[in-house]
Structures are given as C-alpha cells and as structure tokens.
Image (cartoon, rainbow, N blue to C red):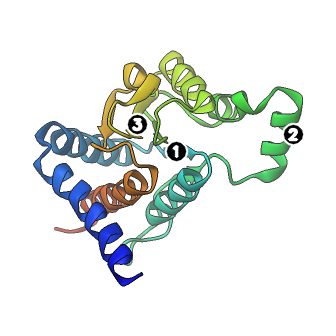
Amino acid sequence: MTQKIKDIIQRSISVKEQVLQDEPLIDNLNTLVEKITHTFKQGGKVLFCGNGGSAADAQHLAAEFSGRFYTDRDPLPSEALHCNTSYLTAVANDYGYDFVYSRLLKGMAKAGDILVGLSTSGNSTNIINAFEMAREMGVITAGFTGSTGGKMAGLCDILINVPSNDTPRIQESHIMLGHIACELVESNLFQP
C-alpha cells in the first residue's frame, strides 16, 4: 500500500512538472491573471462553474476572491454559479440541466465580466452552453480543462489545458493553477 501511495503522488508531481514546462499554458495563466485584475479594477465580477469535483473547485476559487487569499482586504465580486440550489433544481427541472449555467449567466453577468469554466474533459454541455451565452454577451471565457480542451477549446478566450487525461491529476493541477491566479490577482490589486 505504501508504494501505491507514493506512485499516486509521483503521478501528480509528473503532471505538475509537465505544467511547469508548458510555456503556452503558463502564458495563458498570466493572461488570465491580467484579465481578472483588469475586470476587478473596472468593477466587474468573476463567475465560476463546474460539475462534481470541478464544481467544488469552482466554489473554492470563487471564495478565494470573495473572501480572501493571503491579504486581509475588501472582498472581490466572485461567485460559483451552482450555489443557489433552489435555482439549480428549478431550472434543471423546468429547462434541463444543460441550461443551468447559461440561464443564470444571462441574469448575472455583463460585458467585460469573466466566466471561468472547469471541466476535465472540456465537454460538459452545461458549461459549453454557458460559454456560448458568454460570447453573445461579451463576457470573457476562461476554460480549465484536460489535455485537448475538448469542445470548450474553441469557445475559450483563454484556455488552461492541463497536459493530462487523468481526471484526479487534472483537478489537482486546476486547483494549483487557480490558487496561483488568486495569489497574483490579489497581489496586483492590494499590494504596493
């Protein structure tokens, strides 16, 4: 069992080493940090969406902005779109689960806001529909995906595609990269 644990840790490290060497991914993360910083400076908001474990990561990252990361500072306008369960269950029941994010985005976002979608496959229909709505509205789209980016790749203004097809390893990298973005945005906005 000890060796299995070490093997899993090593697989996680290997994916992160690939991320470290992926210059386009690093450049895209830097672009995302700049866009989020600008959006917050302009009074805009950053919204997140995902399914399952990616929904938990979306909520986690939104809380880093709306709460705090390192700095004791004012909250930043950020939310995960799945947190209102009454809305989620009503729209899923009345319109279908594929529309839970696009419908709420239409009511909450404005041009210049950012929508971050987390999907290890890049093929989550509800996120794809939200990205299509975002395009119509002038909302910037950033996708956190696995290696290919899936169907989301063509809808992302900024694509953070982790070089892996292993769902847990992708999600571990998503939270690492999301934390980096939160730390750098917070530093840009609140540290001299």
Among the two numbered marks 2 and 1 on one chain, the one whose residue lies closer to the N terminus: 1
Q: Secondary structure at mark 2?
A: helix
Q: CA distance from mark 1 to mark 3?
A: 12 Å
Measure the C-alpha gap from mark 3 to mark 2. 26 Å
Q: Residues within 10 Å of mark 1 (few under 14, many from 20)?
A: many
Q: Is disc 1 placed on a helix, strand or loop?
A: strand
**Marks 2, 1: nearer the viewer:** 2
Of circles 1 and 3, which is in front?
A: 3
Confirm whether residue 70 shows in the render: no
Q: Which mark is residue 47?
A: 1
Foreground residue among 143 and 80: 143
Looking at the rendered structure, which numbered label has been put on residue 60?
Answer: none
98 up-or-down from 3: above or below = above
Using the image, tell me which numbered label, if any, was put on residue 143: 3
- The residue lying toward the viewer, choosing from 9 and 91, is 9
Q: Quadrant of the C terminus?
A: bottom left
Q: Residues within 10 Å of mark 2 (few under 14, many from 20)?
A: few
Decide if residue 164 is on the left or right side of residue 106: left
- The reply to whether callout 1 and callout 3 are in contact (CB within 8 Å) is no
Image mark for residue 90: 2
Residue farthest to the bottom? 2
Please determine whether, in this image, residue 174 is positioned above or below residue 44. below
Q: Give the spatial CA distance, label 2 vs label 1.
A: 20 Å
Q: Is residue 56 left or right of residue 42?
A: right
Point 88% across, 29% down: residue: 94
Residues tagged 2 and 1 counted as in contact (Cβ below 8 A): no
User: For the residue marked with disc 3, what is the amino acid?
Assistant: Gly
